[in-house]
Image: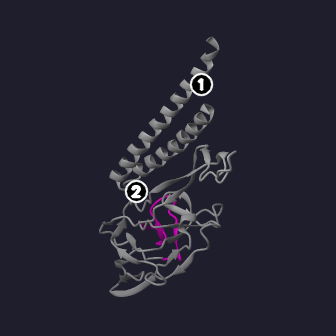
Amino acid sequence: MAITALNSAATGLRALSTRIDVIANNLANAETTAFKRSRVNFEDLMYLTMREPGATNSAGDISPSGTFVGLGVRISNTQLDLEPGSPENTGRPLDVGIQGNGFFKVKIMDSVGDGYGYTRNGNFFQNKNGEIVLGMGDGYKLVPPVTLPKDAIEISISQAGLIEYTKGGTKSTAGQLKLNQFVNPQGLKLLGGSIYIQTTASGDPIESLPSENGSGVILQNVLEGSNVDPVKELVALIKTQRAFELNSQSIQTADQALQTIGNLRRF
């Protein structure tokens, strides 16, 4: 059975090593705009059945329980924590945050997914053509597209996502921000750069105006911060480190048991 202990402890080391990687990535992105932390979920593996529950012995007695030996652990999935991050006031008119549910839709490379990505990062800029683009990567264009004149002033974005500006003393409407929701946002695929793409698991995006159909509202001059709590991550890191050490101790104990068995031939 020492061999089983070795293999079980090895699965624990592999799973815990991955958890350390995830925690390290969370901590590294503690200051990344709109970053969502990930959590590692574990599940136990198959079991060796040494005795079935309800088995009958030679005296006719029925065992009230069975005997099972587990074969270790594995990672079932990594789960996104979609709790909103703290709003950070920037004072920039094109910085917007989402208070509540929803993602902005942007145009990414056609070769990736269906050519569209989704993000909660509202750090927008104007490109040379006046189009509103995401201020990261290759400047992904906002969908639906919004264009502002180069000499536009007093840009305002309402909680309902209506974008207005003043030019030559006249107030005009530039466009409308829309938000997208998913039935299963946990099923989104992470691309990096706070960009997600839809998958079969996430379902198709449900587009709506801000504050409608359960979507959030738009906050101007605000960016959503990372939802990583460094204190919680450090506590999780310490717990993972201790569990890693315990699994290492299990390997050492199993090794000593095998060594003892191997030395029996000398007696």
**Can residue 157 be seen in the rendering of this structure?**
yes
| Secondary structure mostly seen in the magenta stretch | loop
Q: Which mark is residue 258?
A: 1
- Type of amino acid under label 1: Leu
Q: Position of residue 172 (x, y in %)?
A: 40, 86
**Can residue 127 be seen in the rendering of this structure?**
no
Residue at figure coordinates x 38%, y 60% from the top left = 227
Quadrant that contains the N terminus: top right
Residue 10 left/right relative to 20: right
Question: Quick check: 254 above or below 72?
Answer: above
Residue at figure coordinates x 66%, y 61% from the top left = 111
Q: Nearer the viewer, residue 211 or 142?
A: 211
Question: Quick check: 76 above or below 254?
Answer: below
Q: Nearer the viewer, residue 161 or 164?
A: 161
Tell me where residue 101 sits by quadrant.
bottom left
Circle nearer the viewer, 1 or 2: 1
Q: Is residue 19 magenta?
A: no
Badge 1 or badge 2: first in the primary sequence: 2
Residue found farthest to the front? 59
Residue span colored magenta: 124-146
Q: Position of residue 38 (x, y in %)?
A: 47, 56
Q: Which mark is residue 32?
A: 2
Q: Which mark is residue 30?
A: none
Secondary element at image label 2: loop
Q: Residues within 10 Å of mark 1 (few under 14, many from 20)?
A: some
Residue 195 left/right relative to 227: right
